[in-house]
Image (cartoon, grey):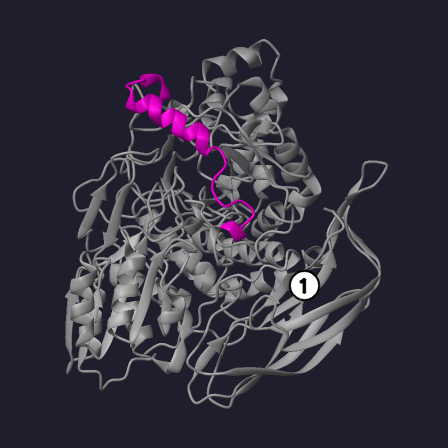
Amino acid sequence: MTVKIAALLTALTLGTGLSAPVQAQAPVQAPVPTQTASSQSAEARADALVRGMTLDEKLQLIHGFFPPLAKPVPPIAMIPSAGHIPGIPRLGIPTLRESDASLGVANQIEQRKGDVATALPASIATAATFNPHLAYEGGAMIGAEARAKTFNVLLAGGVNLTRDPWNGRNFEYLGEDPLLAGIMVGAHIKGVQSNHIVSTIKHFALNSQETGRTVLDARIDPAALRESDLLAFEIGIECGQPGSVMCAYNKVNGDYACENDWLLNRVLKRDWGYKGWVMSDWGAVHSTEKAAINGLDQDSGQELDDRMFFDARFAEAVKAGRIPMTRLDDMVRRILFGVIDSGLMDNPVPETAQPIDYAAHAEVAQRAAEEGIVLLRNQGDLLPLARTAKRIVLIGAHADVGVLSGGGSSQVRSVGGAPVEIPLTKGAAASFARITWHASSPLKAIKALAPGAAVTYVDGSDPKAAAQAARGADIAVVFAWAWRTEAQDPESMALPDNQDGLIEAVAAANRKTLVVLETGGPVPMPWLSRVPAVLLAWYPGQRGGEAIANILFGKVDPSGRLPITFPASPAQAPRPEPLGLAELRAADARRDAGDKTVYGMSGGVAPFSVDYGEGADVGYRWYAARNRKPLFPFGFGLTYTRFGYANLKVTDGAGLTVEFDVTNSGQREGADVPQLYVEAASAAGTRAYRLAGFEKVRLAPGETRHVTMTVDPRVIARFQRAGDGTESWSVDAGAYPLRIGHFAGDAALTATARLDARSVRP
């Protein structure tokens, strides 16, 4: 663990250590300990419990029920949700009650009347805050709600890197850079587990597209994987110490992730020394003996597998000696370690639901939304909106009643309900996802901030009518949306329903047109040059309407930065569309013809491979290596003030520390995210500038703050394997050019560090 990451852990625990908090933090409900923790280590306690267990009790812990399909249904003292593993009362081992999570306590399976939860913005919006404190607060908030609802395992902590801009699940993840994603997911997990419940980190690994996710083989050079996606997991595990790791649906280099010896045994458990347990994704298990021997500790949602693998088959394999008893003991020990180390064993969740302060939790969601909103364009300083604007028209995206949410297992039924729900009629997600808006009206919020103005709404279904309404307005605000979901990738990156045409028509009618985008990732913007202002709101959660209004009117200064690159067109990206589309369309045709065999987890898609030839050059590194200028670069975001950098100091040699001053040279208070990029070589021999440090600072007009960034050596190292088979991160001796900038490719300050050769064991 580097000095930088160790300092971050302290800061997240104590609430200090980073530059001044960007927003005051509201209290989040904390659990009250019910027992005094044992003085023994979690490992020793787990060992003792394993020694006292019968074979049947051990077997009971290694597979979990999916309650809606479980027959017979076990006694479930909770809101039915994702998973249930019966406890062992005589040993004080609690029943594990699992809920989908990340954006809030999700409950897509069976909704008890009146049961709701606080909906955070999409994880990609949290990543855009570049603020680990907010990630921690969001995790602490949903962990508190989970505990109050009697859940004790949250399937949170998604950190798959954004390799393709069209991936349907990008909104659930934390961007394309391993340092940013790792730190942010670690903070989120640490927040969840501050409530003495278990969080996972997922989906391990390379679950980078949804099309064919259960049958595809993700192919990549192992060293490149170490330098990219696995580095994000490694940092996240160090920062957050999750009780469990969830393995992915897909194969990695020929073996399913949930029975992949290299991923689970070698990298995760041996090299990283991970002591918790590996649970499968729901329906991701394909074998008994291979999965167990190669590192899977628990089959989750077993009813979604093709057959039961970890029940009677597993017991028979143990009795026959094909799975050693020592391996079963290790599986159980790891599960118990996660339960004990998280504090769950000594602070069991209540047996009945507890009150939740939803009003306080909504403030957490709103702060995250406000800091995650990214101002992409602001020509002529159209924003913030003048208080003198008397006629404002809002157009499209149901902005009269709410804000869009992403779909799938992370979907939260939020406080206030869903004013708009559109069922899916086709696609892999049709069985469990719906297009949903949270009840947070931008129209209502804007009216509250402009009490003297006439604020109206038109639905945008008719571009001519929308243009006519815009023609007489002082300001026209077009709300545009693009829905994304788990289980399927979009057919096109473009805004649906001719929204590009709508924006063109409104912009032609009113030169003061601004666009608010509610999307889960990049969209093409053919109208960009004709629109003076663009605000990216992502999926902003249950207080999104208020957050958008506060940014538009300058009550809050925009401070979000892009955690992913926005390409100028799909053709710029490594893959312009999902691989496996031909297989998917063939399966859809068979389904439409009445072939019942295409239903199930695979959707009838034939297996195929995806070759990630870009290796470690993910996102902004890909575009830089090919001299492709994106629409908006990673790290980009405008504010209502200006920031400058000066007085760069580099301390190099055995390590690398960079210091400089940040000054707010504008007339308003605001927050900046200075970013450090260092050029270094990868295992493949390519050189690229990599994000090596970032910090969010809030400054008053004219204020200067000194910032210090200590670089984790793995970020600027290459991963190599020696002839004797040993592996290490190697920092080569020599010159390392570096930049301090506002975004990837920016060079406000430059210098060259000279580093000594250094080897860091994985």
Residue 144 percent coordinates (x, y): 36, 53
At mark 1, the secondary structure is helix
Q: Is residue 649 left or right of residue 369?
A: right
Residue 561 percent coordinates (x, y): 48, 67
Is 3 above or below relative to 595?
Answer: below
Res 118 visible: no
Residue 684 percent coordinates (x, y): 74, 47
Q: Name the residue under label 1.
A: 3
Q: Which of 225 and 384 is in front in this view?
A: 384
Q: In this view, does 474 lie to the left or right of 210?
A: left
Tell whether position 589 is magenta.
yes
Residue 86 percent coordinates (x, y): 38, 28
What residue lies at 46% left-to-right and 62% top-to-bottom?
128
Res 38 visible: yes
What residue lies at 39% left-to-right and 61% top-to-bottom?
526
Q: Quadrant of residue 611?
A: top right
In the image, what residue type sits under mark 1? Val
Where's the N terminus, which quadrant? bottom right
Local crowd size for mark 1, using a 10 Å CA cut-off: few (<14), some (14–19), many (≥20): few
Q: Nearer the viewer, residue 302 or 547?
A: 547
Q: In this view, does 351 lie to the left or right of 658?
A: left
Q: Is residue 531 left or right of residue 718?
A: left
Q: Which of 100 and 639 is in front in this view?
A: 639
Q: Give the range drawn in magenta.
A: 571-599
Q: Report how many numbered discs are placed on residues in the image.
A: 1
What residue lies at 40% left-to-right and 70% top-to-bottom?
529
Tell whether position 243 is magenta.
no
Is 300 above or below relative to 415?
Answer: above
